[in-house]
């Protein structure tokens, strides 16, 4: 399995090219075609140049809610089409920014999860399952595949806020459709913790100074990181409901054999 690295950008910490991932039948994802990311509002002028000129970025797909987009709008890049494709509705608990800040939202969530020692893990696993079981979310992921099928050249980038949950599930579905082994999918997913570690710990230090609540900080850390079990719960929900990933991709993502082959031809080499 190829080494999983991030694109070396100045203001973005969790942006990576999926090029080079190998399928079960020996083909590889073309470089500079598929880019997953977290929020883009922190990008510098140099970052813009790297993405548009070095990586050939042509489409920016925003998975965030309307409120999130308002609070931290994406920079408009020359030659790049911007597509709003929210995976969750504005009313979705735990993802929206209905509160004045992300910090207050997370604090509220932790307070609600005080009934169980594993409440954070249980909450996240439930959220992940809903991303593939909720009709609205499935519809939005299906639109994402439509965008990918229309992207004949250049790179498409998709992002949410942290680039871990909505992007994590969307990326897992895409890699599954391309025939990437689950071991690789999970390894890519777990790299979120590596790439965002410095940012997460810095934010938690700031919060700890204000909140003075170690238990709360521990819960927030769990919410801001990923665990393998979260994504595994998605695979389990799909297999429980549809029998196989292939069946789910066909019935819910609209990927019949012909379209799946089109997707592979667009994004795989070899």
Image (cartoon, rainbow, N blue to C red):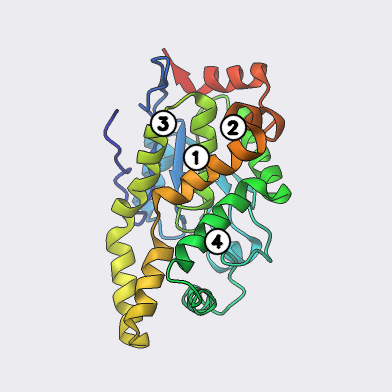
**In screen coordinates, is 114 left or right of 96?**
left
Q: Residue at x 33, y 57 (%)?
A: 196
Residue wearing tag 1 = 171
Q: Earlier in the sequence, mark 4 or mark 3?
A: 3
Point out the frontmost of discs 1 and 4.
Answer: 1
> In the rendered view, would you say 46 is above or below 111?
above
| Crowdedness near tag 1: few (<14), some (14–19) or many (≥20) residues, C-alpha within 10 Å | many
- Where residue 216 sits: x, y (%)? 39, 78
Residue nearer the viewer, 26 or 248: 248
Q: Earlier in the sequence, mark 2 or mark 1?
A: 2
| Crowdedness near tag 2: few (<14), some (14–19) or many (≥20) residues, C-alpha within 10 Å | many
Q: Residue furthest top?
A: 270
> In the rendered view, would you say 247 is above or below 103?
above
Point out the frontmost of discs 2 and 4.
Answer: 2
Q: CA distance from mark 2 to mark 4?
A: 22 Å
Residue wearing tag 4 = 73
Residue wearing tag 3 = 32
- Where residue 225 sits: x, y (%)? 38, 59
Instruction: Let me know if residue 196 appears in the view.
Output: yes
Residues tagged 3 and 1 counted as in contact (Cβ below 8 A): no
Instruction: Let me know if residue 168 appears in the view.
Output: no
The total number of labels drawn is 4
Q: CA distance from mark 1 to mark 4?
A: 22 Å
Quadrant containing the C terminus in the rendered view: top left
| Crowdedness near tag 4: few (<14), some (14–19) or many (≥20) residues, C-alpha within 10 Å | some
Residues tagged 4 and 3 counted as in contact (Cβ below 8 A): no
């Amino acid at each position: 399995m190829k080494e999983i690295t991030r694109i070396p950008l100045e203001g973005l910490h969790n942006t990576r090219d999926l090029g080079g991932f190998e399928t079960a039948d020996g083909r590889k994802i073309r470089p500079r075609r598929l880019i997953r990311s977290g929020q883009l509002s922190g990008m510098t002028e140099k970052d813009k140049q790297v993405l548009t000129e070095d990586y050939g970025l042509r489409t920016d797909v925003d998975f965030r809610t309307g409120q999130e987009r308002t609070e931290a709008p994406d920079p408009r890049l020359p030659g790049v089409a911007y597509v709003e494709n929210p995976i969750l509705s504005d009313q979705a608990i735990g993802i929206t920014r209905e509160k004045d800040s992300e910090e207050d939202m997370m604090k509220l969530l932790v307070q609600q999860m005080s009934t169980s020692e594993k409440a954070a893990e249980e909450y996240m696993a439930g959220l992940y399952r809903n991303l593939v079981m909720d009709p609205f979310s499935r519809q939005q992921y299906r639109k994402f595949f439509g965008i990918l099928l229309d992207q004949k050249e250049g790179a498409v980038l998709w992002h949410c806020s942290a680039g871990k949950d909505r992007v994590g599930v969307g990326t897992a579905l895409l890699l599954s459709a391309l025939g990437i082994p689950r071991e690789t999918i999970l390894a890519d997913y777990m790299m979120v913790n590596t790439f965002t570690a410095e940012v997460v710990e810095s934010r938690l230090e700031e919060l700890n100074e204000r909140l003075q609540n170690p238990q709360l900080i521990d819960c927030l850390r769990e919410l801001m990181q990923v665990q393998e079990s979260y994504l595994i719960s998605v695979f389990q929900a799909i297999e429980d409901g549809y029998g196989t990933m292939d069946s789910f991709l066909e019935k819910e993502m609209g990927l019949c054999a012909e379209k799946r082959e089109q997707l592979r031809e667009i994004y795989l080499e070899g």
